[in-house]
Image: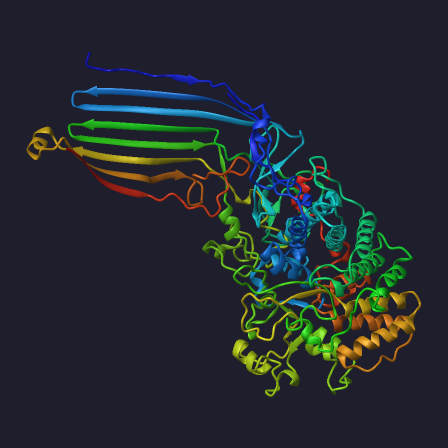
Amino acid sequence: MKNVYKIVLVALILSTTTSCNDDDFLEQTSVDQLTSASFWRNAEDAQSGLVAAYSELESRSDFWDGWQEGRPVVEYFRSDYALPGPDASNYAHWMSIFNFSYTNGHTFLDVIWTTNYKGLNFANQVITKVGEMTSDKISEAEKKQIIGEATFLRGYYHFKLLTLYEQIILRTELISNETLDKPLSTRPEAWEVIISDFKQAAEMLQTVDNTEPGRATKGAALAYLGKAYMYKAGDPSSSEASDFENAALAFKPIVEGAAGSYALESDFSSLFNGENENNNESIFELQFKTADATSNNSTRLHAFVGDWSIGGWGGIAATMDIVNEMKSEGMIASNGLYDNRLYGSLYFRDPFYNDPNTNQMQGSTWDELMMETYENTNDNAVYFRKWLPNYVWNNSYVGVNVVLMRYADVLLMYAEALNETGATPQAITIINNVRAVHGYMPPITVTSQADVKKQIIHERTMELTLESVRFFDLRRWNMLDQAMQAAGRSNFSAASHAYFPIPLSEIQTNSAID
Amino acid sequence: MTTTQDLLITKEVAPSSGVEDPVVNVGEFKNKGLELEVGYVNKNGEFGYSAFGTFTTVNSEVTKLSNANQTLYGIGLLFGSDHFVNQTKIGYEPGAYFLPVADGIFQTQAEVDAHGAQPNAAPGDIRFVDQNGDGVIDSKDETYQGTAIPKYEYSLNLSADYKGFDFNIFFQGVGGNKIYNGNDFRLLSLDTGRNFRVEAENAWTPTNTNTNIPRAALGDLNRNSRASTRFLEKGDYLRIKTIQLGYSLPTNILETLELDKLRIYLTGQDLFTFTKYSGLDPEVGGSVLSRGIDINLYPKYKSVIFGLQLAF
């Protein structure tokens, strides 16, 4: 047979079943690793757990999309006084926040949501697990301190979320299989939990004089309690007649010295340039330090804020409107200039920045720097100055702290709460104090409640520009639509953009949300 | 038929839980199909030849998930938080495509107005089909658009030898699958002032209307570059995986050289691909829940190998 001839025809139908009904083998306990059950052995474990709860503050744990870009874009770009910097147009996802054309899948919405909820998970673990520790493992005093700080943080993370998103999911317990998916709470329910946590923390915590820098204090808890009432007062879904009164009650012990020794710092610029950290005016401050052999907790926020002309990355710029607003009282400061806080907050073309005999432009002048970078004197450009160290040319990692709550903010909120509750003369005294110390400005001349409120709106711009308050202040004053229109932000409508939507990632994974 | 039960997979949990995504049992997948293999070998004097072919059909279906109405999403191409392409749900292939349908480009304002469901659109923008007719384009307009899993796969291996020469060619192909061209999404979204691919020059303008690339619009308010069938393509291909020609020296020469064997050969790998897919390489893999997405993949390279086989 010369030919070999073969045809193979195989039709295979496989039927196999793979299963692992015996789930035990998947649940081995590792004897040489700590688990959430075997941790919490002593005070040191409790402190370590607490550090984790702090680590998510201001989305710091997600350095680029959280802290470095996400937070400033979300909190600064949405101010009516902000403009995208020369670098911003490279990033569609920054511009969609600026233009209010973002969707619920936006990465910053996702990252900020996720990091704050991680913080809540850590805070809840500390509150529950340290709460279960017996006196042979940790002293009562230390236990109270740690739980107090974690309770403050739980309030802080919920507050942060509620002020950013239209609705939130309250997380006040350890996560279990049953609570993984949880429905949204109403805003009044959320405010109740936030206020209760800040109140409880204020009871448990020590004053600033007895606490390490960076840790939550009685003063911080009271300041955020008052701030929560102020925001709630301006939230139509939840406001109550007693909100301003409650806010004033929270601020009062801070102002009267019962919650620690606070005072206004005389050097306004030093509050932001890293050369006067954890000073008397600081109530809650995010701690950074340059890297050394054993640690790295640094920031480049100054590179985002700083313009190209001073060596920054040009992430953000300011409108001419804010310069005009800050100049609106004229050159009536005691040194013959405009309100001192104008110069502490902004760079713009002005004799102050064109004087070769000062070091205000880092050893140069505005005109020189602008000619060098933009080939003209950039007459209508305005840049923010806060959070820049005195050596912006170095735009790499620095250890400049970022103060999240300071005494001047408390004073102005206290004045606002007093003014809203009829104590206008008292409010005027407080406003004048802030103006004199930080602005070198004479006392105000207006006296009516309505005029004093207008003055407070002005003072908050003078004092707190680029401190993550403007958008939120406008919202609680019901001024968003008007301000955005004036700024030419035509795509904005408060009905759609006052709050962020629930992130797509949450809707996709949480079966308790439609 | 293969049933995969208790499939262990990293499940994305609600970010509001604050916990890391755990590995859990997600469900049960069924694979049904037919495998056919045909071979033929013949020798005619000094001329030998053979042919082997395979043909396989696959039908994958998700039959069980942790809860019946559950949808598991694949990766989001935009920062991981947006632009989701694949969905895994009961009754469909794992990681099937669920997308709104892109229906060409609006040429006039009248067309935009007539459509009515895209308030931010202008001439030059993509028209999306309002599947449920509710006047908005949203996730409810996502419909099943096929799968990255081929309906059938086939191969053919042909060999022949004559005297010292030998020749082999191996064809392989798939059909019935789709590929999501993520590189087009990333490099042709025309939404901001950054670098795009050269086809961006063919974007729609009032004087360049015969194109499938929408207008360049800062901010992309119409979301032309949202996940949609705009970037979905047929993934069928036939590829000549290898082609080889060899020559072995005859025994009498080998004896004088004191060698057992000396063969020289030339091999070409992945030299020819027949496909309508526009991307670099139709062989796109993926994971269970996220497959068929062509984004930032390193394409297979063509290679030509010259070889020498020596045996002592």
The N terminus of chain A is located in which quarter? top left
In the rendered view, would you say B213 is above or below A448?
Answer: above
> Residue at (67%, 57%) from the top-left corner?
A58
The C terminus of chain A is located in which quarter? top right
In the rendered view, would you say B180 is above or below A209?
Answer: above
Q: Residue furthest left?
A: B256
In the drawing, does residue A74 fall left or right of residue A397?
Answer: right
The colour style of the image is rainbow
Q: Quick one: A471 or A141, which is closer to the camera?
A: A141
Q: Residue furthest right?
A: A422
**Figure label count:** 0
User: Residue A422: where, in percent of width, then height?
Assistant: 93, 67
> Residue at (23%, 35%) from the top-left corner?
B245
Asked if residue A104 can be seen in this view, the reply is no
> Residue at (73%, 80%) from the top-left corner?
A340
Q: Quick one: A374 or B288, which is closer to the camera?
A: B288
